[in-house]
Amino acid sequence: MPNDSRNKSDDAEANEAREPDNESLQTLSGAVAVPEKEQPNGSKEQELDAPPDGGYGWVCVACVFLINGHTWGLNSSYGVFLAYYLANNTFPGASYLEYAFVGGLSISQALLISPLATFITRQYGTRTTLLFGVFFETLALIGASFANKIWHLFLSQGICFGWGMGFLFVGSVGIVPQWFTSKRSLANGIGTAGSGMFGMVYSLASDAMIERISLPWAFRILGILAFVVNCTCAILLKDRNNAIGASQMAFDHRLFRKMEFQLLSGWGIFSMFGYIVLLFSLPNYALSIGLTARQGSIIGALLNLGQGIGRPAVGIFSDAAGRINIATFLTFTCGLFCFVIWIFAKSFGVLIFFAIIVGTVAGTFWCTIAPVGAEVVGLKDLPSALSITWVILVIPTTFSEPIALELRQTKGDIYLHAQIFTGFMYVAAALCMWLLRAWKIGQLQEIAACENKSPESIGALQEVEPGEILDPGTKSTLIARMFAWKKV
């Protein structure tokens, strides 16, 4: 009997040793906790599913690259269509502002539809959301080929295309971070580079098709290409929402109470005020300094080329030096380029240089928001955080270009005030990220104190464990954290 009792005690201790405790569950840094599920004996068990940091994730990266190219990249070619509309009076009676509103409408609608897209993802899955996007985008391009009034263009190339772009974007933007840990920013940078690369390709291709085979057939060919590519990618893309227990709430109001999310939103708002001005105003700025329309279109294409080249590089440096660090530095750098290069760019050669170099950093927000957001709110709440972010960005993406047009002067350097506005917007965005960086360092210091470890031993991907109670008094002052060096 004593031996039996001792054996049972040993078995119980062995079983306890085999069961993971809550403190061993980690997210983002290799192991991701999934929702608890009931076991037959009534006990609960949390399973771990580590992101593979590659594997099929690279297929997903390729699919996201192509989707971005055939949504945002296609939309970047709108400047070519705008030039054709104005030069040929395609829709009699339509004004310049009405044509410009079509381009802005597509972006704002893409962001505005994001809560519905997130809701559909939660109810019916990612693939359904993507296929909705394929349907609306194809319908928009084919429908635009039959447009003969300006309101037809509003409905097709504006609203309908925006809905398609929004469903495809929201359905795909959060997938890549789910497959990677140490290579997350690199993978995300490659995925987002599709918009820049195909923006350049379709800017040149659309111009050639309109000239050689007519405007309607240019729309139809683009519609067929978008359908084939996006439909294929929608079939191949796989999310890991179930594995990580992702929250697909379309509007989680609790995030607004978190200072870190407020700073993240501020970064996005100020970045978009600057980004949209660069994207839409740079070709017209070329005309204002005496360049030809063709040279202006080349400047716009080179800006997209810079984005295609720069975004993977941003990802590489982010993984090496810290995602928040790089996002802060490059956002500030973009503002600096506006002040020291764009204001003084009065020749075609200098403007080419500026378009390429600013293109590499202008879209830093787009290629880092998913990995940075994952570190700020966690993978579980990332879809909801992104959904809210897209809605917030409707305001700057809608009004930034009108603000820039209003800031133009009638003589002299007519774009000077718009250039200064753009630079300050990027600097303000960088300030938000600087404060967010200080918050992240403070959180890591609190985690280190709670776990009795040195702050240097806590990685940037470390999250608060379930049941941990952090002591705010264990972190250093805000000023100290703002100037402290740490890979975050």
Image: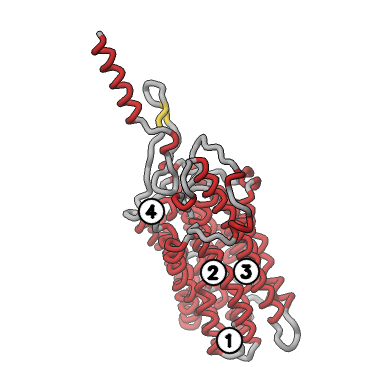
Which marked residue is nearer to the observer: mark 4 or mark 3? 3
- Asked if residue 247 is positioned above or below residue 340 in the image, the reply reads above
Mark 2 to mark 1: distance in Å?
30 Å
Rendered image: mark on residue 426: 3
CB-based contact (under 8 Å), mark 4 and mark 3? no
Quarter-wise, where is residue 90 in the image? bottom right
In percent of width and height, residue 190 lies at: 42, 65
Mark 3 to mark 1: distance in Å?
28 Å
Mark 2 to mark 3: distance in Å?
9 Å
Residue under the point 42% across and 39% down: 25
Please tell me whether mark 4 sits on a helix, a strand or a loop. helix
Query: Which is nearer the N-term, disc 2 or disc 3?
Result: 2
In percent of width and height, residue 383 lies at: 52, 49
Q: Nearer the viewer, residue 443 or 88?
A: 443
- Asked if residue 233 is positioned above or below residue 125 in the image, the reply reads below
Q: Which residue is mark 2?
A: 330
Mark 4 to mark 2: distance in Å?
35 Å
Give the residue type that dot 2 points to. Answer: Leu
Rendered image: mark on residue 293: 1
List the single residue furthest toward the right: 410
Q: Which residue is mark 4?
A: 235
Residue under the point 44% across and 45% down: 27
